[in-house]
Image (tube, helix red, strand yellow):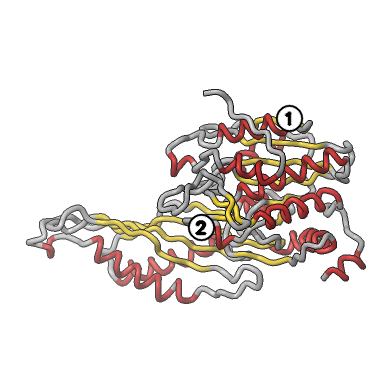
Amino acid sequence: MAMLRFNPTDVVQLLQDMVRVDTVTPTASGRADAELPLAEALLELARTWGLSAEFREVPGAAPNVLITHEVSPGAPWLLFDSHLDTVGVEGMTIDPFAADVHDGRLYGRGVCDTKGTGAAMLWALREVREARTATQNIALLLSVCEEHSQLGVRHFLTHDLPGLAWRPAAVIVGEPTSMQVVAANNGFVKWKIRTTGVAVHSSTPHLGRNAVSDMARVIVALEDEYIARIERAHPLTGGGSCSINRISGGTQVNVVPAHCVIDVNRRLAPGESAEIELAQVEAILQTLRERDQLLCVQQGEADAVVPLAADVNLPFGERCAATLSMAGIPSQVTGAPYTTNGNHFGAAGLVTVVLGPGDIAQAHTKAEWLEVAELTRGVAGYRTLMEHGPSQPAPLSAANQAR
Ligand SMILES: [Zn+2]
């Protein structure tokens, strides 16, 4: 297949070009390199615009694209990130890849989450390169596999970043935040809990041990003694939470089941840690085991993403919000309960905020849309951040006025 080529004359066309390429995330589409055609087209487009652009390989996936615009070797680097993949299109009530515009809204899968932020970042970068108005070095990472595992950014941080000649002074992750500066996000830990019984014919259940019935007791204990006691009080993210979201067990209607497993998802507020939460759950399970010596219940291996903590990101977030407000985009520093690529940048020790056009309420929906006016506001917002150097302290008085 011939390589896709983009030649957009404005940011709306760029976003339409991007949405028309199906980049449903590999785990949902079954295509390991789902983002590749889009990555190739954007790499070429960036080069056409005079920007440096290269692939950064991600084993088993499409490559990330790293686009850079260096204005001065001594200047700080501001890194932008936006993911190229989208969630699936099942159940959508619009053509997910038509990218039609009606009544000032652009419709399509990924238009809001988060090709809109990527298009706006790339367009802003094109503008500041042409106008020669960037006051710092700018990098744009177009990353892969965010919607499932954040593999693209995880790999970039562990394998690419240490070898680069520069380290970002700060990172702006593009997700739909209605141009509010999100400086704190929840993380999560997800894991399985298994009960193991003894399978027997259901005509003699007393000879076996029912793993499903055991799991029922485990669930009640977790709901009452763990989940109900989680404090939901974080001022920026709303606090942590936990839910048991999947269960499976048993083989046939006439066999007492030997296995049952649940999937637990604990959202971690800044300040909470996966280790402490897993230990609390373990203590509850241990109490159950002591009450019933024959109960066999085990926690499986956990997969955790640490929260994005506000404190280290607040000063940069305040400067971003002040810069945006001065450019006529009212913006405040806030937090959000979801998890993004930003959590990984934060975990790598980088100052990070999440910021982008569009409303998170539109993400992953069956008729996903983004207002065209919001898209152009995104370009203006990113551009002003590239031009007014929020990685250096902003004038305090102006910042205070803007708040
Ligand atoms: Zn997203």
Q: Which residue is mark 2?
A: 189
Left or right placement of residue 292 versus residue 379 in this view: left
* Residue 392 screen position, x and y as percent: 87, 53
Within the image, what quadrant is residue 248 found in?
bottom left
Which residue occupies the extreme left position in the image? 203
Left or right placement of residue 196 versus residue 245 in this view: left
Q: Residue drawn at (71%, 37%), measured in percent from left and top?
A: 162
Q: Residue drawn at (55%, 32%), measured in percent from left and top?
A: 59
Q: Residue drawn at (61%, 61%), measured in percent from left and top?
A: 359
The residue lying toward the viewer, choosing from 275 and 264, is 264
- Disc 1 versus disc 2: nearer the observer: 1
* Residue 115 sits above or below residue 209 on the image: above
- Residue labelled 2 has its Cβ within 8 Å of some atom of ligand 1: no
* Residue 155 sits above or below residue 349 on the image: above
Q: Earlier in the sequence, mark 1 or mark 2?
A: 1
Q: Residue drawn at (88%, 36%), measured in percent from left and top?
A: 73
Dot 1 lies on which element? helix
Disc 2 marks a residue whose amino acid type is Val
Within the image, what quadrant is residue 333 found in?
bottom right
* Residue 93 screen position, x and y as percent: 44, 54
